[in-house]
């Protein structure tokens, strides 16, 4: 067990290091990163002065070590556009994205898991066909389309929900549903496979032979066993929700880090964009690690693999 | 035994072929020039016709351009970007996976750790950052999508290569004097092509969504060139007055992605009977 944890921690550390390195080089793909940080209309002297001040005139290896050192101190730099520390700018928007991701996750769980169970239990029937159509739609809907259609229908025509912005809990409903649709489809598919697999096992036959109804057998025995693979996807989906927020927050003018990323790109404030990419990747790696460790604590067979 | 293909799958294939034909033939079947603007014809609803300009079956956009023509040309952009970027990631990912599975040891460790790292950066964010740094253009779009989405192929190719490399016919080829490159490309690749094709199909749908998404955000195909994403992005401001600018391109995108996803599931069930019905 201890060896597994150590190896898994090392893997996560390597992934973190590589992600940081990838982002460093992506930021320098244009040749001169100074140009990504100056507000539009800066003079050549100002740019040269800034290049020197930020150390972009040093050799690449020196820049890289400096960058690693800053990150080791959790120093994400200063935004030259907003004249504030980058971490402060990102942190001020973070609660909105967390609320949105939580809303989307709740929606996806309360719709996706029951849908998956129903598809497995009533296999081959009309229910399964209808629900698979729903799952397919959730999987294929571009959020920037479903988002605008929702705004048009529930906001503009029916006046049920606010069309955009963050104005109380009601304004969280539409973005959550739109963002959560893909995760809903994933949960439904995973739950269906997982429940189907368990339904074929001997203990289900035994429970049914003892006179338990199908519903009781599913609730008492199957769900507990079918939950493990589903829990794994849940953690991974949280990472995808954070990434998907870029588009959904743009559509609904939701003031989270996704909207901030797009605003910072167009304001040429790339340290903020860099911080957001790093942050979401770190969350993703941490969630992955946490799931694997929790998983191995529950099921000792996992440790031998990976 | 002749494989049975269900009616549903035939319809799906027919739809994909229609989309591809529309994309291919856009210059010949478009009723209008997709770039020609006319201030007099702004935001005309579907079915509008004028004596001088003719019929606009799906209406016009905010600059008076014919929406149907723009959607047809947009399909062209979607297909070209998706085909090219899937090809880039398929080639890069497969070669790395083959190398990792064949040479194992340090090569495999290096490649697979890099794959882990790439899979921990959400692709859409990495693509957004990269395009924003380099500046949006057609080539950037294809390369960025292709070079962010290869790790899934590497994982599949790696696992499959490990499996196939242990089979007796590979040892036979080695004894016959074939070098690594020949064994990998002539003997192993054909045997692992199935699972790679399944990944490529589902990636094709994703690439179409990514292209539209990036274009919607202003980081993909640049206006005035037509793309489904950029048409919807421009139409968003007029959504209350001109619903057709949102509904039609989105419907095209949604239908195409549904078809590709169904196709992908079907292929997977065919090529991997163990997963049938999943």
Image: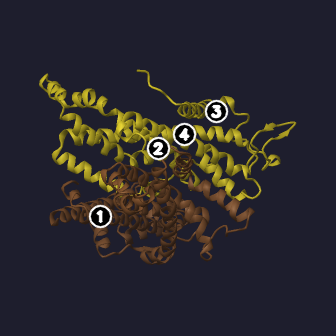
Chain colours: A brown, B yellow
At numbered mark 2, what does the secondary structure look like: helix, strand or loop? helix
Q: Chain of mark 2?
A: B
Residue to which mark 2 is pinned? B142
Residue to which mark 3 is pinned? B26
Q: Residues within 10 Å of mark 4 (few under 14, many from 20)?
A: many
Is B116 positioned to the left or the right of B225 in the image? left
Is B2 positioned to the left or the right of A136 in the image? left
Pointers 4 and 3 within a single chain:
yes
Residue to which mark 4 is pinned? B259
Where A49 falls versus B79 (above or below)? Answer: below
At numbered mark 1, what does the secondary structure look like: helix, strand or loop? helix
At numbered mark 3, what does the secondary structure look like: helix, strand or loop? helix
Rendering coords of residue A136 (x, y %): 53, 48
Say which of B212 and A238 sits in front: A238
Q: Residue at x 40, y 47 (%)?
A: B149
Tell me which label, 4 or 2, sits earlier in the chain. Answer: 2
Say which of B269 and B150 sits in front: B269
Distance between mark 4 and mark 1 Cα atoms: 35 Å
Q: Residue at x 26, y 65 (%)?
A: A298
Distance between mark 3 and mark 2 Cα atoms: 21 Å
Q: Residues within 10 Å of mark 1 (few under 14, many from 20)?
A: some
Q: Chain of mark 1?
A: A
Where A27 falls versus B139 (above or below)? Answer: below
Q: Chain of mark 3?
A: B
Q: Chain of mark 4?
A: B
Q: In this orientation, does residue A256 appear?
A: yes
Rendering coords of residue B30 (x, y %): 69, 33
Nearer the observer: mark 1 or 2; the answer is 1
């Amino acid at each position: 067990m201890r060896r597994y944890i150590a190896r898994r921690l090392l893997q996560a550390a390597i992934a973190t290091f590589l992600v940081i390195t990838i982002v460093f080089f992506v930021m320098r793909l244009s040749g001169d990163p100074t140009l990504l940080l100056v507000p539009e209309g800066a003079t050549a002297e100002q740019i040269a002065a800034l290049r020197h001040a930020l150390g972009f005139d040093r050799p690449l290896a020196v820049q890289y070590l400096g960058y690693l050192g800053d990150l080791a101190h959790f120093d994400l730099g200063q935004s030259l556009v907003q004249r504030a520390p980058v971490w402060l700018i990102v942190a001020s928007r973070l609660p909105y994205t967390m609320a949105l991701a939580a809303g989307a996750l709740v929606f996806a769980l309360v719709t996706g898991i029951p849908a998956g169970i129903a598809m497995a239990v009533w296999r081959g029937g009309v229910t399964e066909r209808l629900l698979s159509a729903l799952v397919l739609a959730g999987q294929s809907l571009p959020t920037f389309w479903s988002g605008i259609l929702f705004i048009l229908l529930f906001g503009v025509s029916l006046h049920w929900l606010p069309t955009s912005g963050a104005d109380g809990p009601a304004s969280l409903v539409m973005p959550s549903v739109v963002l959560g649709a893909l995760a809903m489809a994933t949960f439904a598919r995973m739950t269906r496979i997982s429940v189907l697999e368990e339904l074929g096992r001997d203990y289900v036959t035994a429970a049914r032979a003892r006179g338990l109804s199908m519903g009781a057998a599913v609730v008492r025995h199957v769900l507990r066993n079918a939950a493990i693979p589903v829990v794994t996807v849940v953690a991974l989906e949280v990472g995808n929700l954070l990434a998907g927020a870029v588009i959904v927050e743009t559509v609904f003018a939701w003031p989270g880090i996704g909207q901030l990323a797009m605003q910072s790109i167009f304001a040429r404030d790339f340290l903020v964009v860099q911080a957001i990419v790093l942050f979401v990747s770190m969350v993703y790696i941490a969630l992955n690690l946490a799931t694997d460790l929790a998983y191995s604590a529950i099921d000792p067979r996992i440790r031998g693999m990976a | 035994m002749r494989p049975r293909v269900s009616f549903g799958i035939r319809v799906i294939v027919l739809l994909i072929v229609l989309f591809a034909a529309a994309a291919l033939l856009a210059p010949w079947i478009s009723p209008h020039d997709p770039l020609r603007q006319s201030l007099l014809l702004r935001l005309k609803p579907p079915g509008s016709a004028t004596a001088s300009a003719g019929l606009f079956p799906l209406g016009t956009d905010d600059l008076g351009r014919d929406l149907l023509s723009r959607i047809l040309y947009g399909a062209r952009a979607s297909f070209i970007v998706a085909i090219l970027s899937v090809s880039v990631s398929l080639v890069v990912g497969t070669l790395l996976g083959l190398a990792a599975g064949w040479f194992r040891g340090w090569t495999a460790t290096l490649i697979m750790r890099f794959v882990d790292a790439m899979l921990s950066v959400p692709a859409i964010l990495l693509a957004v950052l990269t395009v924003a740094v380099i500046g949006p253009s057609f080539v950037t779009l294809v390369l960025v999508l292709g070079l962010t989405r290869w790790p899934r192929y590497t994982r599949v190719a790696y696992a499959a290569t490990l499996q196939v490399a242990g089979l007796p016919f590979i040892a036979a080829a080695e004894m016959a004097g074939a070098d690594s490159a020949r064994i990998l490309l002539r003997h192993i690749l054909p045997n692992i092509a199935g699972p790679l094709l399944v990944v490529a199909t589902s990636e094709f749908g994703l690439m179409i969504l990514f292209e539209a998404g990036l274009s919607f955000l202003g980081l993909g195909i640049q206006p005035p060139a037509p793309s489904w994403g950029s048409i919807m992005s421009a139409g968003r401001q007029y959504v209350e007055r001109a619903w057709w600018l949102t509904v039609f391109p989105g419907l095209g995108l949604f239908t195409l992605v549904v078809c590709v996803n169904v196709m992908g599931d079907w292929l997977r069930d065919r090529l991997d009977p163990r997963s049938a019905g999943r």
